[in-house]
Image (spheres, rainbow, N blue to C red):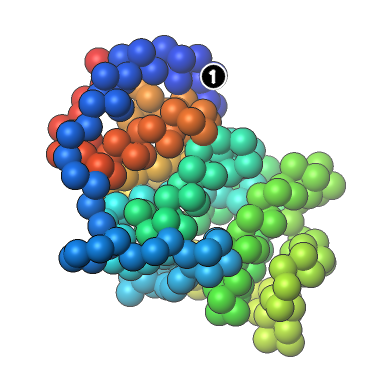
Amino acid sequence: MTRHRNRTAAAMTAGALGLMLTGCGEQTPTSTQGSKIPPYADAEQLPEQLAPDGTTIVVGDPAAPTKVRVYEDPRCPVVEEFENLGGASALREMTVDRETKTEYTFASFRDDRLGGDGSKRAVNALRAALEADKFVEYHEVLFQNQIEVESSGGFTTSTLLDLADEVNGLRSDSFDHAVKTMKYETFVKDSQKAYDGANGDEPLGPGTPTVVINDKQVPEEIFGLLFEEDLFRELLTSAHRSPGWWKAYQPT
């Protein structure tokens, strides 16, 4: 389900987290033994691939020491805030720097709530962009335009193709065909199933956005940090530098 963010959550928890976020004593991990690999020049250079599970899209150095999984629905306005105004920019920076790798699982439940099939079509188009090695760029474009698109009826085939024009080299006969025919419909359905199963025995998924750092979900008590770029950067950096602290962390 879509969760409504609490704008005061970050402010309420920042003080409690302060000592932990600034007191990490473990050495920063690196992607390889010895010297650290130089960062990618920019997000367009990031490797992107489909994981063996067939539903996870992995962005960044596969050997990056910190793993961050993000659950998103393309039509969710709270995800749009995370991507455009919140902590997603910090996550992108750390992925470019080879400190993290980012794993995306896409839901499409908003279609059932709002009507239409815009989420499903957007997830299909994102999968098609992955085939063209343009997922990172197209993902950014979709969320940059989400509010305007939703106000005019949601993601449609024509809108998705028009937005693809903003990504250099994405449009092609194969990409257009995949978008028009819902070529990756099975991927869309399987991704929704993976999202639904992310809460264990719970019948519904964890909500969007949900962020999981090194297999530990950012808890509800500090959910607001996802929307405060600097605070989320501190949290993610601390979890990266001090994995033991993050594993043991419990909100108070």
The quadrant holding residue 159 is: bottom right
Q: Quadrant of the C terminus?
A: top left
Left or right: 172 with respect to 71? right
Q: Residue furthest right?
A: 152
Q: Nearer the viewer, residue 112 or 209?
A: 209
Left or right: 53 with respect to 242? right
Eyeballing the image, is 105 above or below 188? above
Q: Identify the residue under disc 1.
A: 7
Can residue 106 be seen here? The reply is yes
Marks counted in the figure total: 1
Q: Nearer the viewer, residue 40 or 246?
A: 40
Q: Residues within 10 Å of mark 1 (few under 14, many from 20)?
A: few
Residue at image coords 46%, 47%: 91
Residue at image coords 23%, 52%: 29
Eyeballing the image, is 161 above or below 225? below
Eyeballing the image, is 233 above or below 31? above
Q: Residue furthest front?
A: 35
Left or right: 168 with respect to 140? right
Q: Nearer the viewer, residue 89 or 22?
A: 22
Residue at image coords 44%, 28%: 231
The quadrant holding residue 222 is: top left
Q: Amino acid at mark 1?
A: Arg
The percent coordinates of residue 61 (x first, y second) are: 37, 66
The percent coordinates of residue 27 (x first, y second) are: 19, 44
Left or right: 127 with respect to 125? left
Residue at image coords 48%, 43%: 90
The percent coordinates of residue 188 (x first, y second) are: 52, 65
The percent coordinates of residue 237 (x first, y second) are: 34, 39
